[in-house]
């Protein structure tokens, strides 16, 4: 069988409940909804870690966090790790391309050197619009230098303070344009391709979207932040008081609503760019021969549970992400898959589609096969936070905080630990999908809590028994921190 082309579209910090195929009625996402309707919608995809770098390292190596050693946002992927894209290129003859964000290592590492096994023939890297603009790898900056030097100068001058980027010059538009050009260049080739279109949106600062897209959001249906009904663990409370974006208490309801509106407008805009790329596949006659994968690296709390962005709190807005697959002839249209998928499953999926063995990432599962049986081999999905994020000062938490989450199709348990103490949260996601009532310690749920706690214990024991992390760390100094407080 001829291996398929693979088009992978990845967003940054997009929670699952922001697409129409997941029930969202306030953000227009017609193109991604059509993609999901034409293939499989995964209802329970959990990230391996709620922070960019560790999560992306898992997605692209097929390993849980301890397996590749990238546990924190500034860690660097060890040089002997191999991205699955390298295997597609080396073993299956794929032509490979990256347009946008990679971030399997710290931004300080990636702006100066490529990973030796990233596996990309075409490497047009861009972490975000106004960061590492002088990097020789930055394809977006190079494009702006040729096409829009005035806007480039504004970005260099204002950084994240440059608001409402013009539609024609937006990073998401650039990534879509480059992806379309790549698809067109491959339509007459016999060689299969893998293309990663990796967007920065809808990541904060929430105000880089073209201003006209704000009008597409159904303002009357923007939900208010979720409020917990029971006391939250001390780790969560610490993050509420020291998130890198600020404290929720310091933001007015109007400011929080503005954040949610900007986030949604970015999604509406990126959906339009995805539509353009999918149309290019159609025009090139490659739709039937292409596996399309859409996912995000993690979500965003957007004020839910008293929290901004992402971090130690492993609530669904942070750890639950959209995952859509379309492969005509292999995945039935209209499939709804309730299996416990994880971000790292993308690796085995792509390798299996290309006809390659997947034993090198044995903890990654083939998502195509998962849709056929509507089940995963794992009995719970695990997300592990290992002091992975930074606080309002741009430094790692001291004392360190850890959180490990295990979930099945209905229940979810998170174990928080810091300074020698631990606390738990148990939620029934069927009756309490917003995770407002902690059931930990309730005798009626003792059996399910024990089962999930045993799964967490087994995962932690496997971590301890494995080789120690080999990642190095690149910690930026205070002048390089990316901090943005919308007030």
Image (spheres, rainbow, N blue to C red):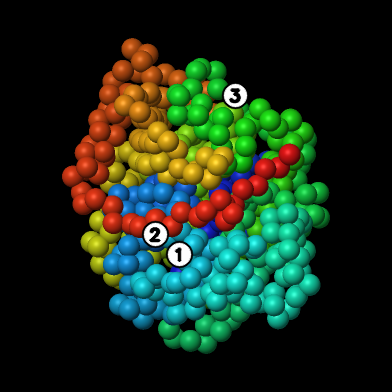
* Residue 306 x %, y %: 59, 29
Residue 227 horizontal side relative to residue 345, left or right = right
Residue at the spot x=70%, y=35% of the render? 256
The answer to the question of whether label 1 and label 2 lie on touching residues, with beta carbons closer than 8 A, is yes
Q: Please give the name of the residue rendered at 33% of the width and 78% of the height, measured from the top-left corner.
A: 90
First of labels 3, 1 by sequence position: 1
- Relative image position of residue 263 (x, y in whole percent): 67, 47
| Residue on which the image places disc 3 | 227
The answer to whether 51 is drawn above or below residue 412 in the figure is below
Depth-wise, is mark 3 or mark 1 nearer the camera?
1
Q: Is residue 237 above or below residue 278?
A: above
Residue ID at (49%, 62%): 108
Q: Name the residue beneath numbered marker 1.
A: 109
Q: Quadrant of residue 92?
A: bottom left
**From this viewpoint, which residue is outermost toward the front?**
478
- Secondary structure under the numbered disc 2 in the rendered image: strand
The mark found on residue 76 in the picture is 2
């Amino acid at each position: 069988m001829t291996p398929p082309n693979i088009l992978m579209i990845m967003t940054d910090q997009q929670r699952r409940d922001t697409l129409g195929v997941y029930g969202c009625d306030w953000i227009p996402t017609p193109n991604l909804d059509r993609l999901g309707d034409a293939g499989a919608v995964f209802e329970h995809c959990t990230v391996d870690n709620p922070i960019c770098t560790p999560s992306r390292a898992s997605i692209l190596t097929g390993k849980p966090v301890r397996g590749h050693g990238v546990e924190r946002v500034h860690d660097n992927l060890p040089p002997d790790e191999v991205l699955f894209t390298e295997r597609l290129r080396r073993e299956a003859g794929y032509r490979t391309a990256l347009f946008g964000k990679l971030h399997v290592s710290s931004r300080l590492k990636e702006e100066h050197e490529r990973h030796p096994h990233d596996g990309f023939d075409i490497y047009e890297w861009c972490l975000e619009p106004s960061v590492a603009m002088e990097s020789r790898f930055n394809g977006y900056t190079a494009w702006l230098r040729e096409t829009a030097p005035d806007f480039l100068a504004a970005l260099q001058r204002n950084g994240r303070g440059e608001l409402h980027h013009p539609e024609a010059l937006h990073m998401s538009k650039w990534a879509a344009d480059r992806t379309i050009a790549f698809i067109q260049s491959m339509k007459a080739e016999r060689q299969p391709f893998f293309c990663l279109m990796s967007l920065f949106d809808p990541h904060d600062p929430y105000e880089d979207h073209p201003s006209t897209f704000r009008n597409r959001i159904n303002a009357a249906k923007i939900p208010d932040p979720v409020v917990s009904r029971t006391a939250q663990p001390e780790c969560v409370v610490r993050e509420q008081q020291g998130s890198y974006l600020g404290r929720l208490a310091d933001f007015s309801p109007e400011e929080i609503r503005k954040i949610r509106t900007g986030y949604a407008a970015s999604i509406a805009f990126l959906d339009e760019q995805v539509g353009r790329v999918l149309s290019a596949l159609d025009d090139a006659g490659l739709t039937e021969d292409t596996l399309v994968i859409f996912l995000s690296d993690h979500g965003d709390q957007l004020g839910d549970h008293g929290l901004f962005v992402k971090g130690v709190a492993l609530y669904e807005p942070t750890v639950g992400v959209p995952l859509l697959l379309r492969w005509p002839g292999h995945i039935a249209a209209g499939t709804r898959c309730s299996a416990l998928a994880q971000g790292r499953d993308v690796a085995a999926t792509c390798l299996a589609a290309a006809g390659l063995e997947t034993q090198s990432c044995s903890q990654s599962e083939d998502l195509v096969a998962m849709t056929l049986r509507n089940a995963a081999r794992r009995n719970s999905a695990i997300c592990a936070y290992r002091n992975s994020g930074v606080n309002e000062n741009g430094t790692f938490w001291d004392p360190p905080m850890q959180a490990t989450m295990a979930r099945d199709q209905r229940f979810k348990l998170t174990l928080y630990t810091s300074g020698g103490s631990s606390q738990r949260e148990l939620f029934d996601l069927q009756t309490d999908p917003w995770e407002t009532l902690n059931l930990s310690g309730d005798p009626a749920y003792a059996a399910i809590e024990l089962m999930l706690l045993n799964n967490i214990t087994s995962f932690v024991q496997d971590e301890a028994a494995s080789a120690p992390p080999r990642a190095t760390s690149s910690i930026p100094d205070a002048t390089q921190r990316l901090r943005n407080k919308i007030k």
